[in-house]
Amino acid sequence: MNIKIAPSILSADFGKLNQEIGSVEQYVDLLHVDVMDGHFVPNITIGAPVVRCIETKLPLDLHLMIEHPENFIEDFVKAATEKGRSKKDVSITVHQEVCKDLRKVLEQIHSFGVKAAVSINPATPLKMIEGVLDDVDMVLVMGVNPGFGGQKFIENALEKIAALRKMKPDLDIEVDGGINAETGKRCVETGANILVAGSYIFGAKDRKQAIVSLR
Ligand code: DX5
Ligand code: ZN
């Protein structure tokens, strides 16, 4: 499978966000946008108004680490597509842990014409999402407890990636948190095909080189 790289803007300088995105744009495949609410995760980041200001031709990979995502999906779809981005270039990922009716939330996302994905935290077993694997465009396996960039990779993500790949040979499997050249390589060998990296890319002296080392 083709490996895709998704830099996470969480580790970028938000004061010059579009410039930061521009510094990596030509070397990557997607832009990973971390939305945090201070409830589901112990940190607050950005919402739809900032997503609206993102200027890039890259597809947007919106990672919603928020409670009640169903209340915000329409806002994010509008913010992501308002300036002409095609709906097929937008994916919205929700966490299994916050969805009482996961299938319904995924259907809601699809009803807007964008891609729908589900994510699981390190402590959440794969069996919690097995029932929806035919209804998603991507699964996001967390390599850290969500909330902050720069944390250490938690190894149990590898077992989940391997099991998922066995079940779904063609599914997009993304891994997020603690990814560098070494952990990224192991995730790809295990079956992941989309690598999210924040601090490893934006913290690097040579961002292009950091991205190249992930491929
Ligand atoms: C963590 C976020 C990640 C984060 C990854 O809660 O979902 O996307 O930015 O950061 P690194 O790559 O530094 O672990
Ligand atoms: Zn993320």
Image (cartoon, rainbow, N blue to C red):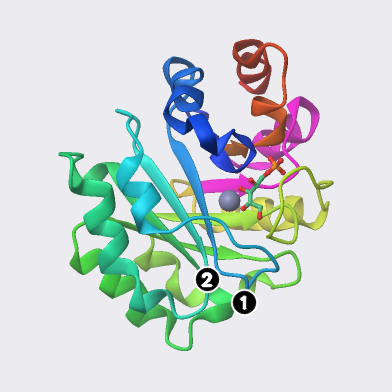
Question: Which mark is drawn over residue 39?
Answer: 1
Q: In which quarter of the image is residue 140?
A: bottom right
Region in magenta? 173-194
Label disc, if present, on residue 66 of the rendered structure: 2
Please name the residue shown 76% across and 71% down the image: 123
Q: Where is residue 13 in the image (x, y as percent from the top left)?
A: 59, 33
Drawn side of residue 152 relative to residue 213, left or right: right
Q: Helix or strand or loop: what does disc 1 sit on?
A: loop
Placement of 57 over or under 69, stated as above or below: above
Q: Residue at x 71, y 46 (%)?
A: 149
Query: Mark 1 packing: few (<14 Cα in 10 Å), some, or many (20+)?
Result: few
- For the image, the number of numbered tags is 2
**Residue drawn at the location 70% of the way across and 68% of the way down:** 42
Give SS at disc 2.
loop
- Say whether residue 138 is left or right of residue 79: right
Q: Residue furthest bottom?
A: 100
The amino acid type of the residue labelled 1 equals His
User: Is label 1 in contact with label 2 (beta carbons under 8 Å)?
Assistant: yes
- Label 1 CB-ligand 1 distance < 8 A: no
Q: Which of 113 and 167 is in front in this view?
A: 113
Answer above or below: position of 92 versus 23: below
* 3D distance between C-alphas at marks 1 and 2: 7 Å
* In the depicted structure, whether residue 89 falls above or below residue 111: above
